[in-house]
Image: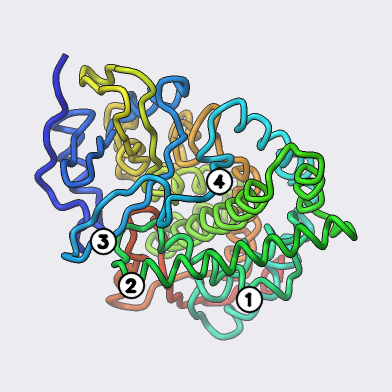
Amino acid sequence: MAHAPVLADDLFAPAALDDPYPLYERLRAAGPVHFLPALGLHLVVRHAEVLAALDDPATYSSHLVGLLYAGEDGVSLLAAGGPDGGGADVLATADPPAHTGHRRIVQQGFGRGRVAELRADVERLVAPRVAALVAAGGGDWMAGLATPLPVLVISRILGLPDADAGRLTAWSDAAVELLGGLAGPERTGGLALEIVAFTEYLHGRLDAAGRVPAGGLVDEIAAARADGRLSRDEAAGLLLQLVTAGSESTTSLLGSAVRMLAADPALQDRVRTEPALLEAVIEEALRLESPFRGHFRVTTRDAELGGVHLPEGARLMLLWGAANRDPGAFEGPDLLDPGRSAVRSHTAFGRGLHFCLGAHLARLEAMAALSALLDATVRIALPSGDRPSYVPSMFVRRLDRLPLLLTPAPDGGATV
């Protein structure tokens, strides 16, 4: 059994953060698992080994809260337990039986039936935002729709006021930045205070729902807190994860998918002619630009992964973006191919025990937004010379802006 090769590349170099795929390609070619000594972290980069870890949650535990941060010298470090060593392990960072209980409390809000009921509401939220962008001849898609829409939708599922969407977005962004690996000590402290304020807000919403039902999942979580199924910290932590993950993944998808369409006029025309292809385009966008770069695992025993020895307590990061472009799993992995077989075989939403609760919801929002945009336009284009601008992070892969040039359809489009 071999030891993982040591990674010599700087994973946090600006070029690697901006476009990680050349690095991922080199890593995959050299082996399935690599060791990053500075972080004490094993990176899993091939599709087969990522699936093997996902399919064995008893060995590859999610019960590791890892915080990447930049030390005094600017070198990124990995701490377990968060910035203050506290916090509750819930849902994404919990193992059974706790994870099973957490998921049972909230899963009814994200099932296919409940999501289908939201379609008309989502379309009503989409329509005026698309109409405004088209009427203006374009604008920033991220600010105009991709960022506000998911926060409003998840707020309605949870039972949080629409009026709080701006604060929720700011707090969610703070949580993402805190986990991104680039914040120095002073910035980390400021972000941690933002999370304290976010948590206090969520405690307040749970307290209010315990008195007067809010009409969303916050009621179920408040009830679970009241009867002892969740502690006070677990209840707030569960809400925090749902707000943050529920908005972040969809915002990323909305940006990536529209940028891919804008960069490929022939694909736009094909999807307008064959609307049934849009679902596959969305799946390919998820595969090519996975919203989260990776998630942590920790081994509960000595293990072997891809022929590499992992001791008990080894910390891993499963790199979705690397696995989803593995030529061993996908033919022409860097190409957007809506005719690809097994188009949902990517790991952008995880798999198995920790498969993303909000996957159906993210797909619904993407279908609604992209359908409306395609119907309302005859051309979606990028400004000349525009380069993609991504949020600097080792945690997420999201555009921070997406300027578009939009040519309206002669009839104004079918949905706006």
Instruction: Give the numbered dot on residue 88.
Output: 4
Spatial CA distance of label 4 from label 2 is: 23 Å
Helix, strand or loop for disc 4? loop
C-beta proximity under 8 Å, tags 4 and 1: no
- Kind of residue sitting beneath label 4: Ala
C-beta proximity under 8 Å, tags 4 and 2: no
Q: Is residue 73 left or right of residue 270?
A: left
The answer to which of marks 4 and 1 sits earlier in the sequence is: 4
Question: Which x, y percent locates residue 399?
Answer: 41, 65
Question: Badge 1 is on which residue?
Answer: 410
Question: Which x, y percent locates residue 405?
Answer: 46, 77
Question: Which x, y percent locates residue 210?
Answer: 84, 55
| Residue in the foreground of this view, choosing between 231 and 13 | 231
Question: Badge 2 is on which residue?
Answer: 186
Instruction: Give the numbered dot on residue 70.
Output: 3
| Residue in the foreground of this view, choosing between 99 and 250 | 99
Q: Is residue 340 left or right of residue 121?
A: left
Q: How many marks?
A: 4
Q: Residue furthest right?
A: 212
The answer to which of marks 4 and 2 sits earlier in the sequence is: 4
> Which part of the image, by quadrant, shows the C terminus?
bottom right
Which one is closest to the eye, mark 1 or mark 3?
Answer: 3
Q: Residue furthest left?
A: 8
C-beta proximity under 8 Å, tags 4 and 3: no
- Kind of residue sitting beneath label 1: Pro
C-beta proximity under 8 Å, tags 2 and 1: no
